[in-house]
Amino acid sequence: MMNRINKKLKEDKKLLSIYFSAGYPRLEDTKLIIENLEKNGVDMIEIGLPFSDPLADGPTIQASSTQALKNGMSSEILFNQLKDIRKTVSIPLIIMGYFNPILQYGVEAFCQKCQETGIDGLIIPDLPVDVYNEQYKAIFQKYGLINVFLITPQTSIERINFIDSISEGFIYMVSSASVTGSNSGFGDEQTTYFKRIADMNLKNSQIVGFGISNNETFTQATKHAKGAIIGSAFIKHLSTHGVDKIKTFTSSIRN
Amino acid sequence: MSYNINEKGYYGEFGGAYIPEMLYPNIEELRQKYLTITADPSFQEDFHQLLKDYVGRPTPLYFAKRLSEKYNTKIYLKREDLNHTGAHKINNTVGQILLAQRLGKTRIIAETGAGQHGVATATVCALMGIECIVYMGEVDIARQAPNVARMKMLGAKVVPALSGSRTLKDATNEAMRDWINNPVNTHYIVGSVVGPHPYPDMVARFQAIVSEEIKSQLLEKEGTENPDYLIACVGGGSNAAGTYYHYLDNEEVKLIAVEAAGKGIDSGESAATSVLGKEGIIHGSKTLLMQTQDGQITEPYSISAGLDYPGVGPMHANLYKTGRAEFIAITDDEAMTAGLELSQLEGIIPAIETSHALAVFEHKKFKPDDVIVLNLSGRGDKDLQNYIDYFKL
């Protein structure tokens, strides 16, 4: 069976992917948010596994992560909340989290649980490519999980080609040298970078993340890339408007 | 078997570089260049010149006669407290600022807990005329006011870390976030033997001046380079790494690492990572760290702000796991008592971090002819208020 991520990437449209912290704003909101996002036309979801020390994240995701932990979120609880998710949701689901909680759960046990739950892939920002290749690749493959790697404007051409060669879904293209949640908009520098990567004709599609907050930045990011991921801006919307008003947010992005 | 780092950046199974891709170019640049730059004769010349003329090295190896009499053994103190800025920390910042210059960096960032590393960083930045930003937990800023003032006077910008528990580990996170945001012009001066490879090795090499001096000084005083024991306190572990460095693979020399037990190992308020920690990833390094069962990093406690780091450098995790070093945990009370004792036996007021190492003599019996070298890693000026409050002086 083809992974849901690969299937989705074949669709002839620009993909909107949404990130949020599991267990935020309330512990029991996780499933409801996922269902509402799918209902409102979101193509893919990154479920954030909260971590005490998220060093690639800006203040918004840090705060939602901290609140989720205060609410009691853990790997075990997340898997419990998601155990029937495939009865109601069919878009690709990716867990995005830092490596230490996964290591403590046990990498193989975690991957096995992902497969049972219907998770399609993982994004683990602080799991280095070489360590993944040497120690964990076989486990991920055994449980049918796609591991998504990141590139940034500073990533060398050789390394982009290497990352492309070992990727099996899409490449997570970090828009600029920044942590998550900066929304100063995209300038010439980003546009040039998006185009430069598009011109490399990589085997994997690229999905842009970091700094996408509205229709304008979504459109700019997806001009050359297959899709874009929104995290902090969605979490801010959740904080202000709660889980019932997700439609307002998603329609504002797609216009 | 070697207890030093291997070519892949690990001490045994500990170490590595578990960093987000955003930091990869910075770390890779360092990894590729740190050995060649630091091995260059002009680097070594500048480094040793500054250590001599600016820092005040070599620091004395002082035979502590009255302390030795009290414990009926031979105790030497390596006087790192006599360095400029009052602790061993400056050995590392001098090395890293010279490295940063050779990398063409024009902006320096650092994290600090108690403020000692922040002051040592601000000092070398002032010396070289380079912009300096120090991240410090909001909680630590409140309780370490004199060091905050010193950094400001030295021209550094002190930025409060407002995330998480607002202490050292969060200051480190903020510094790493800054580096992600400023990948090209900035060098991050990490203050201990922690963080992603090559930091633990690089910092250990700069601190290795301590064991290099011990070897020749002890030879002069005792007719041998080898003491029976080396003792140092361990937070992240940079003064211990420097003390052990040239003796790591010389198993005739026994190593003792002293951690902060806080209010007691089982009190829930402790920083004894070797006892309470499990293997995991913190700040880019695979090591021992204090964490919940779910892998969330927990907040340690010690009366000493320099020892309350929830992890320990990967070199030390390996020394613990292999049994090469003996780890001893000392409570707040034991440390404070030992600090007062040294003050009144030898006329030296030690930093509270160092007081933990000194408390080992109440814990462990040594033979009369044992030769012991203890790293007196810092002076107690910064801790006067703590001592005053504790002893109601």
Image (cartoon, coloured by chain):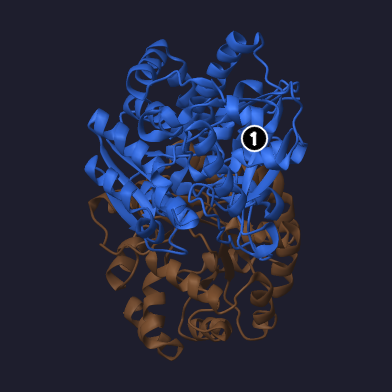
Which residue is disc 1 drawn over? B10
* Residue B199 visible to the viewer: yes
User: What is the drawing colour of chain A?
Assistant: brown
x then y, percent, for residue A59: 38, 65
Q: Residue at x 45, y 25 (%)?
A: B33
Q: Quadrant of residue A208?
A: bottom left
Q: Residue at x 58, y 71 (%)?
A: A92
x then y, percent, for residue A10: 53, 65
In the displayed structure image, the side of residue B358 where residue B179 appears, left or right: left
The blue-coloured chain is labelled B
Which of the two residues, B252 or B11, is positioned nearer the viewer here? B252
In the displayed structure image, the side of residue A255 where residue B245 appears, left or right: right
Q: Residue at x 74, y 72 (%)?
A: A116
Which of the two residues, A116 or B276, is positioned nearer the viewer here? B276
Q: Amino acid at mark 1?
A: Tyr
Parent chain of label 1: B
Which of the two residues, B391 or A246, is positioned nearer the viewer here? B391
Residue density around tag 1, few if under 14, some if 14–19, many if 20 or more, within 10 Å: many
